[in-house]
Image (cartoon, helix red, strand yellow):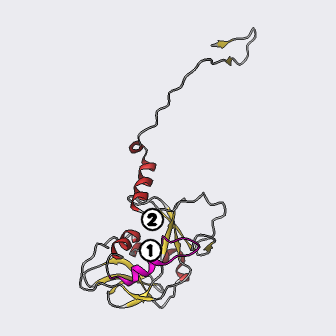
Amino acid sequence: MIHWGTTMQTPSISIKNLTLNIHAAPKATIPGLAMLGAAIAAGGVTTAEAPTNTPEVGQVWPGEGGINGGLVPARGDVPEHYLIIASKDIGDHAWGGRGSESEATSKTDGRHNTLKLIKGEHPAAKSAYEFSADGHDDFYLPAAAELYHCWVNCSEVFAQDCYYWSSSQRSASYAFTMLFDDGYQYSCGKGYELRVRPVRRLFI
């Protein structure tokens, strides 16, 4: 009921015995939650509070396992996230599985590739997957596009004269690599032992 005073004043509102029925919308109608739910189901989602002092790209992100590699836009079922690059290489390893096709064919989703590769004899992917830092154990071997993202944003944190494995297969005998002095992506035989640098995702 609205009570009007004797003079022209802002009306006051008195509400008594009001019952509100609030129905939650189905998850499928909330795109953001649906996307995040799908990513969690696929594994590899680590969430954090919105950063108040995000380090510059190319600088160590305290507590997150490595270097801030920059923001990666959402793609498919993977929401927008920061790419965290391990602070150092973890040795030279063969890609493995020469002569055999694998399901690690994504050019953009290194975690998907890595989860496929660790089921077989693929030393580079396994070494990245087993890496941990600052209590985080969700590292993986980056896909070809993720390596390129690293070159664009902070190539200086990689050895310039070394080839690095991606997790992206090119054929039964070859997989994609990157040389960081020029950003050129090659394909090398899966039996070669090349540098490995793990990465992980930080979802905000």
Q: Position of residue 30 (x, y in %)?
A: 43, 44
Q: Please tell me how crowded label 2 is: few (under 14), some (14-19), or many (20+) other residues with Cα within 10 Å.
A: many
- Which quadrant is the C terminus positioned in? bottom right
**Residue 44: mark in rendering:** 2
Q: Amino acid at mark 1?
A: Tyr
Q: Would you place residue 161 above or below residue 169 in this image?
A: below
Q: Does the image show residue 22?
A: yes
Horizontal side of residue 100 vs 59, given as left or right:
left
Q: Would you place residue 67 above or below residue 93 in this image?
A: above
Q: Does the image show residue 151?
A: no
Task: Place residue 129 in its image quadrant.
Answer: bottom left
The magenta segment is: 121-138
Q: Would you place residue 186 above or below residue 18 in this image?
A: below
- Cβ–Cβ below 8 Å for labels 1 and 2? yes
Gap in Å between the C-alphas at discs 1 and 2? Answer: 9 Å
| Residue drawn where x is 42% and y is 60% of the image | 78
| Residue drawn where x is 46% and y is 85% of the image | 182
